[in-house]
Image (tube, rainbow, N blue to C red):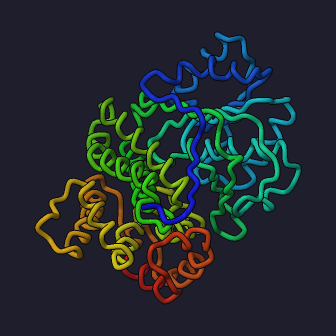
Amino acid sequence: MMEKVTLFRTTRRILFGPGAIEKIGTEAQLFKAKKVLIITDPGVIQAGLLETIQTSLHSVGLPFVIFDGVEPDPRIEVVEKSAEKAKKEGIDLIIGFGGGSSLDIAKVTSILLTNPRKIDDFFGIDLVPNQGLPVILAPTTAGTGSEVTPIAILSDTKEKLKKGIVSSYLFPEVAIVDPKLTIGLPPSVTAFTGMDALTHAIESFYSINATDLSDLFAFRAMELISKNIRMAYANGDHLIARSNMMEGSLLAGIAFANAGVGAVHAFAYPLGGEFHLAHGLTNTLMLPYVMRYNILGCPEKFVQMAKAFGEKVDSLSVMDGAELAVKFVERLSDDIRVPRRLRDVGIPENAILGLAEAAMKVTRLLANNPRKITLEDAIAIYNSAY
């Protein structure tokens, strides 16, 4: 039984399936746009993925320009340059195309064009006054779920920390999710982004803000990702595995857009901010250790997660069944060769105190965690991950 009033939100229009990207011109026409800005990164262009979008926009007679300055874990300066180009070109529709970084830059560019303030004013929850320009998002990785979330993450190089903007105005008007775009992704990218999506599903499932509705999406995401990530990693041309991973990422995004993520992300942010590691990697580095700490806060949820992963828990005690969920994640990380020790990626042991202090500042996410965390707990968790 639902014990409180809850809110469920997602992107209003979602196109999913192989070949969906070919319809982007038709979708763009719905906004009666006069000029489009495509926001992407150099790797997407080099891979030739942009050609389908260009052909589709040409077919409906819609002019466009390209901003390809997106970088991994983008700095605040990147979105400032993107917004500058959009203003100069007289843009009235934005397409974000690429990994989570490109999608996030597209979302933030949209609100910068209609909210004449410094970007620092928007970090936090519901601090964006006005709706941005219309946005269409098309992910090329099965990872962030940014196409269905009201969240964008940027790197503050001065504070060596990742910061989030959370606003309903960051939901795009349209998400186009085409698994064919992920064919040919390198195994390491498949692994990092897939673990990112799995982390979203796990953390939203045991979030204190989880609801029956968000749990439906999170549970199915865990099933899809856990059963398909190895195949997508080992055989990148396997369209069924790619499609299931894309669906899992999408569902996980819908889940965490409503339930939120927790301490894994809070602990991962300073790792990415200070040591410039990929987001999916930093999540994986912290995932099993934060999970194990959280078991006491919601052991039954961990048993359900183990079931989603295909583990046999019926004959076990609740605590033993819960532990299987953590062991599955550890085994999976090893199978797809994602490091899960801080020392394995060059993090010095003397950085732990600073990391723990930085993680404790990410109160927006720690508030969702099923077990309270003190600074001493944070230090212990980082030490266990070392």
The percent position of residue 245, horizontal first and vertical second, equals: 37, 41
**Residue 202 in the figure: left or right of residue 175:** left
Q: 55 or 293, which is in the foreground? A: 293
The percent position of residue 146, horizontal first and vertical second, equals: 56, 46
Q: 31 or 138, which is in the foreground? A: 31
**Residue 363 in the figure: left or right of residue 309:** right
The percent position of residue 187, horizontal first and vertical second, equals: 36, 43
Name the residue rendered at 27%, 54% in the picture: 308
Quadrant in which the N terminus is drawn: bottom left
**Residue 109 in the figure: left or right of residue 194:** right
Q: 27 or 51, which is in the foreground? A: 27
Total numbered badges shown on the rendered structure: 0
Q: Is residue 386 above or below residue 62?
A: below
Name the residue rendered at 53%, 86% in the picture: 375
Quadrant in which the C terminus is drawn: bottom left
Q: Is residue 348 above or below residue 65?
A: below
Q: Is residue 61 above or below residue 278?
A: above
Q: Residue furthest bottom?
A: 376
**Residue 301 in the figure: left or right of residue 361:** left
Residue 386 visible somewhere in the drawing: no
Give residue 93's quadrant in the image: top right
Give residue 34's quadrant in the image: top right
Name the residue rendered at 63%, 36% in the picture: 96
Name the residue rendered at 60%, 22% in the picture: 24
Q: 330 or 170, which is in the foreground? A: 170
The percent position of residue 354, horizontal first and vertical second, equals: 57, 81
Residue 114 visible somewhere in the drawing: yes
